[in-house]
Every structure is written in C-alpha cells, then in structure tokens.
C-alpha cells in the first residue's frame, strides 16, 4: 500500500502536468515510461509551490472532523493544481518578457498560425505550380504536431487570372491538402 501511495503522490500530479502540457503545446510524443523522472520532478514542483497551503491545512484542519474539506483540498493538490500550473505556465510563456528570453513553446509555425482558429482566405501553391484557393474557417481543420501537416478547407474557390477569389466552386464539400504536395501557403484576412 505504501508503494501505491508514493506512486500516486509523486507520479500522478507530474504525469497530469505532462499530459496537459502536451495537449496545449503539441510536439513529439514521448513514451510514458521515459517520462517518469519528469513526472516526479513536476510533482515535487507542484508540492513545492503548494508547500504553505499544505502546511496550513495540515496544521489548521482536523482531518477526522473536516474530512470532506480535507479530501477536497488534496483532490485539488493531486489533480487540479497540476493542470492549473500548466495554464499559468502557458500564460507566462506567451508574455513578451519570457518570449525574449526563452524559445517559443509552439514548435512549428503551422501549429502557431492554425491554433489561433482565425478565418483566412487561403491560396495553397502545390509543388507542381497548381494553386488551390479556398476558405479556412469554422468548419475547416489543420492538423497539429506530431501529425504531418494537412489542411482541410471547407470551401474551394475558383481563382481568376489575377489570382483573386472569383466564386465558390459548385458541388464540392471542400478539399484536403497534404503537406507532401505543398510548396507554400498564402493567408489573407
């Protein structure tokens, strides 16, 4: 039982932090067994940051009389604070000060641009010179790391000879474009 408690106390909060971070900042997926040391380190960081609240609860609450408050607090410590800390870290990483002194957490421009979920008129120039024009909006989708880059445009448009968007193509439900065929993409507001 003691080993189970130690595992829960020193691996679960860090593992929750790691998985939450991977959801917010997609990157290369690592084998969970190789993240054990990181999970323990993040769990210790979690306890270090919550040391005074834990000390206060341990000294102020009689766990036999306030059992529900005690369990709610430790549920927060074990499961919610690791998630909250990742969101705080995300906000800090997006500040100008931190971005000047540390690399950006999003690894690829593709993920950075499309994670903003803005609508764009897009021109995709293929490697063979073909240009596909379309609308990237609420029903569109772009893959994120670690998956290979692919983009689904919900509307395909006919381009005129000047490269302008002339009209929506009839009888189409959109287009999926694979990154292996893309030369570059132009985004327009």
Image (tube, rainbow, N blue to C red):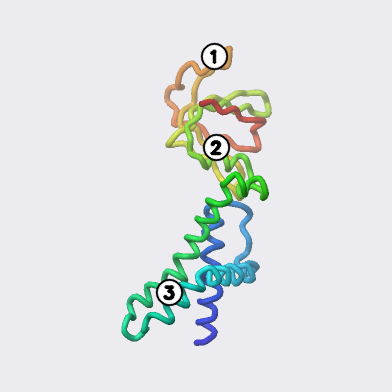
Q: CA distance from mark 1 to mark 3?
A: 63 Å
User: What x and y, as percent, mark residue 20?
Assistant: 52, 59
Nearer to us: label 1 or label 3: 3
Q: Which residue is mark 1?
A: 160
134 horizontally vs 179: left or right: left
Q: Secondary structure at mark 3?
A: helix
Q: Please, is residue 45 above or below residue 92 in the view? A: below
Q: Secondary structure at mark 1?
A: loop
Q: Which residue is mark 3?
A: 74
Q: Residue at x 55, y 67 (%)?
A: 15
Q: Please, is residue 136 above or below residue 115 in the view? A: above
Q: Residues within 10 Å of mark 3 (few under 14, many from 20)?
A: some
The answer to the question of whether label 1 and label 3 lie on touching residues, with beta carbons closer than 8 A, is no
Q: Earlier in the sequence, mark 1 or mark 3?
A: 3
Q: Secondary structure at mark 2?
A: strand
Q: Earlier in the sequence, mark 3 or mark 2?
A: 3
42 horizontally vs 103: left or right: left
Q: CA distance from mark 2 to mark 1?
A: 22 Å
């Amino acid at each position: 039982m003691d080993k189970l408690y130690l595992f829960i106390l020193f691996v679960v909060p860090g593992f929750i932090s790691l998985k939450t971070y991977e959801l917010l900042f997609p990157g290369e997926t690592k084998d969970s067994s190789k993240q054990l040391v990181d999970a323990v380190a993040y769990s210790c960081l979690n306890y270090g940051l919550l040391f005074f609240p834990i000390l206060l609860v341990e000294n102020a609450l009689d766990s036999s009389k306030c059992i529900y408050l005690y369990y709610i607090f430790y549920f927060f410590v074990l499961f919610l604070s690791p998630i909250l800390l990742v969101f705080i870290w995300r906000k800090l990483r997006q500040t100008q000060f931190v971005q000047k002194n540390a690399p950006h957490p999003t690894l690829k421009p593709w993920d950075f641009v499309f994670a903003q979920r803005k609508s764009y008129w897009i021109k995709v120039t293929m490697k063979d010179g073909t240009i596909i024009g379309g609308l990237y909006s609420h029903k569109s989708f772009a893959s994120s790391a670690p998956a290979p880059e692919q983009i689904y445009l919900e509307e395909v448009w006919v381009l005129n000879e000047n490269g302008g968007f002339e009209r929506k193509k009839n009888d189409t439900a959109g287009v999926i474009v694979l990154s292996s065929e893309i030369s570059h993409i132009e985004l327009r507001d």
